[in-house]
Amino acid sequence: MSRHVRVGGFALILMLAALPTFAQQQAEEEALRKLEHEWWEAYKQRDTQTLDRIMAEDFIFTDEEGQVYDKSHFIALARQQVVTAYTLGDLRIRVYGDAAVVTCPSSWRYNIEGKEVSWEFRSTDVFVKRQGQWQAVAAQDTRLPKKP
């Protein structure tokens, strides 16, 4: 057997061995993409049960002013705010075993005391897979400057 055939065969085995890992990575990214959309829709709808399920008990959120909220305060904030619309931009998802980081730009419209207000953010969310389920453990939003 020639050296080229052995090397080619070995390379083929390595490629085939990597396929399940790639498929699993794609499945995890899709699950996180779905969860991210579900999370923000729950926020808009003030769906506290869904928020409670998605966020871990030790969840922390840092807002654009540097204030830190735990899970209960974040859910209380969701109950108070009236979100009229939002859009999530291109989600960038990085999976590191049982941890993942999701980043995206987003636009939000709120009704505050009868007045429409809109802001754009760059968000970073951190998830951990516990007992087979992804949960948010940290999130941080940076408000982007208004466009001229």
Image (tube, rainbow, N blue to C red):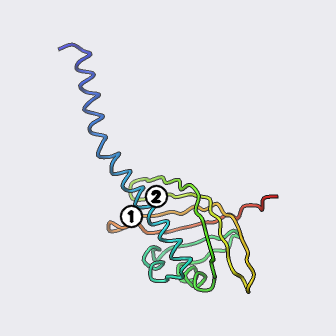
16 and 137: which one is in front? 16
Image position, residue 97 (x, y; %): 39, 54
* Residue 89 picture location, percent across and down: 59, 58
Task: Rate crowding at label 2 as few (under 14), some (14 to 19) or many (20 or more) other CA atoms within 10 Å.
Answer: many
Q: Give the residue at mark 2.
A: 100
Residue, far top? 2
Residue 129 located left or right of residue 5:
right
Mark 1 is surrounded, within 10 Å at the Cα level, by few (under 14), some (14 to 19) or many (20 or more) other residues, namely some
| Front residue (pair 30, 93) | 30
Name of the residue lying farthest toward the left: 1
How far apart in space, not on screen, are marks 2 and 1 (Cα)? 8 Å
Looking at the rendered structure, the kind of residue marked 2 is: Ala
Q: Is residue 68 above or below residue 129?
A: below
**Disc with the residue nearer the chain's start (2 vs 1):** 2
Kindly identify the residue that appears in the image at 69 percent across and 64 percent down.
Answer: 120
Q: Dividing the image into 4 quarters, which one contains the N terminus?
A: top left
Question: Disc 2 vs disc 1: Cβ atoms closer than 8 Å?
Answer: yes
Q: Given the image, on which type of amino acid does mark 1 rest?
A: Lys
